[in-house]
């Protein structure tokens, strides 16, 4: 199955391990993620002000590229898979605004009228977790040749994967898609109260000390619940909970350390893929010692 | 802090920009209870909504509107169906549209620009600059 895949900026730079592992793990399931020949910034945050039509152009242009891919036969359906929670949220919300608000859609079309083509509205936006759920957890399980047995993993959803209502990949109150995936990989799922709490998002740029407070709270909760590792689905969550552990330690010396990985890296490990595909050397803190200890790599 | 007739336009602008009917809020405080950022705020989100209801432009001078991460925890909790994150955005926009920048890219060191995820840099600029 050939599916259009929108990587976004961060998966090409500070979150390469997410991109590499997702492509490899999906391919192992027969899902080929095909990047558009050209794409642009998604806008990173949805234009919340009702009169802000201009900021819908960037995400919708990317969806237009997906329509072109279908027309050229590069992909099977008018569907695009995103991995970064912010890209997913922005693309999906602009698409929804375009499809439900005819006034807004009219203004967008008017603004795009000197471009080679205009977006029609027919593309479906989904997160890879949704793609996998549709594919079937039994099929994911069937591909596992190194079950993550005895590995206690806490799934961390964060914000934009679940909210606002009607946009999220699962129930905003009681999500289970992430848990289902980890279970199908053979891991021991650890539930904790802060799995849907914000990591501080973009405040990591100008208020890293506040992000350290939130990180301390989230990670301490995960550890208290018995987690040895936290899995994320967003490059900003990964940075705030992983790289920012250095800041957490400065402020809270009693905080130890807990590895943060992308769910796609755990898939690659469970599928028995190689070092290049699991790309575990790029995460901070290094998750490899724990995975070696468990006999998984 | 008594509302004046001129403040009606402020209320109208908040409603128009946010697309939310702030009059529905009955101050239950669920948004503030679930907000992950309240420790950094000077006024709780529910209080800022009350200020906007009353047409008090003081809402624009709160630290709260800049601390909000738009995580939408309030949106899923509000029993009155108000998307409070949208209201916070409208308040930020009312300030930003007067050519105000809360932050500046030039404050970042080369090291920060090299190591911070792009998604963080771009979204902070989108949210906090004119």
Image (cartoon, coloured by chain):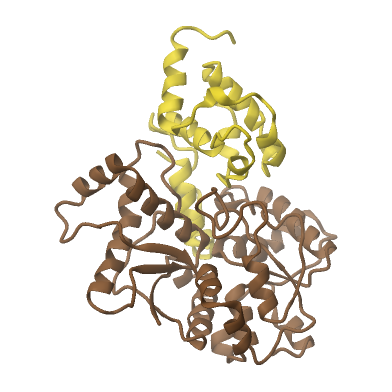
Task: Please tell me which residue is depicted at 50% across the width and 27% down the height of the picture.
Answer: B21
For residue A280, what is the image quadrant? bottom right
Q: Could you say which is closer to the camera, residue A249 or residue A116?
A: A116
Image quarter of the N terminus of chain A: bottom left
Quarter of the view holding residue A155: bottom right
Which quadrant is the C terminus of chain A positioned in?
bottom right
In the displayed structure, would residue B11 be above or below residue B67? above
* Residue B98 in view of the camera: yes
Residue B61 lies in what quarter of the image? top right
Q: Indicate the chain coloured yellow by its letter.
A: B
Q: Residue at x 71, y 56 (%)?
A: A215
For this rendering, which residue is in front, B1 or A142? A142
Q: Is residue A286 visible?
A: no
Instruction: Indicate the colour of chain A.
Output: brown
Q: Is residue B52 left or right of residue A156?
A: left
Front position in the image: A10 or A195: A195
Tell me residue A19's x, y (percent).
49, 76
Is A52 placed left or right of A281 in the picture?
A: left
Q: Compared to B53, does A14 lie above or below? A: below
Left or right of A133 on screen, residue B44: right
Q: Look at 22% across and 76% down and name the residue there.
A: A72
- Label count reads 0
Q: Is residue A276 above or below residue A121?
A: below
Residue at 16% of width from left, 51% of height from top? A113
Q: Position of residue A148 (x, y in %)?
A: 72, 83
In the image, A216 versus A250, the foreground residue is: A216
Q: Position of residue A133 (x, y in %)?
A: 55, 72
Q: Position of residue A261 (x, y in %)?
A: 64, 73
């Amino acid at each position: 199955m050939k599916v259009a895949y929108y990587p976004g900026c961060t998966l090409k730079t500070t979150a390469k391990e997410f991109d590499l592992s997702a492509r490899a793990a999906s391919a192992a399931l027969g899902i080929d993620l095909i990047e558009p020949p050209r794409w642009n910034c998604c806008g990173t945050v949805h234009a919340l002000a009702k009169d802000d039509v201009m900021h819908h152009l960037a995400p919708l242009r990317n969806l237009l590229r997906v329509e072109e891919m279908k027309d050229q036969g590069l992909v099977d359906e008018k569907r695009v898979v995103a991995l970064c929670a912010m890209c997913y949220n922005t693309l999906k919300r602009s698409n929804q605004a375009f499809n439900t608000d005819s006034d807004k859609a009219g203004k967008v079309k008017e603004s795009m009228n000197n471009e080679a083509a205009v977006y029609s509205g027919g593309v479906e936006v989904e997160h890879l977790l949704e793609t996998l759920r549709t594919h079937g957890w039994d099929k994911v399980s069937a591909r596992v040749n190194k079950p993550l047995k005895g590995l206690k993993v806490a799934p961390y959803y964060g914000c934009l994967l679940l909210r606002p209502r009607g946009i999220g990949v699962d129930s905003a109150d009681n999500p289970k898609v992430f848990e289902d995936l980890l279970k199908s990989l053979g891991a021991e799922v650890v539930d904790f109260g802060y799995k849907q709490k914000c990591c501080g998002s973009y405040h990591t740029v100008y208020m890293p000390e506040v992000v350290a407070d939130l990180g301390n709270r989230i990670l301490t909760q995960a550890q208290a619940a018995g987690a040895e590792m936290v899995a994320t689905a967003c490059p900003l969550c990964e940075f705030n909970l992983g790289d920012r552990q250095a800041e957490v330690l400065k402020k809270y010396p009693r905080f130890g350390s807990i590895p943060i990985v992308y769910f796609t890296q755990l898939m690659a490990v469970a599928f028995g893929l190689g070092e290049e595909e699991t790309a575990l050397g790029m995460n901070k803190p290094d998750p490899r010692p724990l995975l070696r200890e468990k006999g998984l790599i | 802090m008594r509302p004046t007739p001129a403040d009606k336009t402020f209320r109208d602008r908040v409603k128009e920009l946010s697309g939310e009917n702030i009059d529905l809020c009955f101050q239950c405080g669920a948004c503030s209870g679930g907000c992950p950022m309240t420790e950094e705020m000077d006024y709780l989100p529910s209080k800022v909504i009350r200020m906007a209801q009353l047409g008090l432009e003081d809402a624009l001078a709160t630290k709260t509107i800049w601390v909000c991460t738009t995580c939408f925890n309030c949106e899923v909790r509000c029993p009155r169906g108000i998307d409070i994150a949208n209201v916070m955005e409208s308040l930020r926009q009312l300030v930003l549209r007067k050519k105000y920048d809360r932050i500046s890219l030039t404050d970042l060191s080369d090291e920060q620009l090299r190591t911070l995820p792009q998604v963080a840099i771009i979204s902070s600029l989108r949210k906090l600059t004119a």
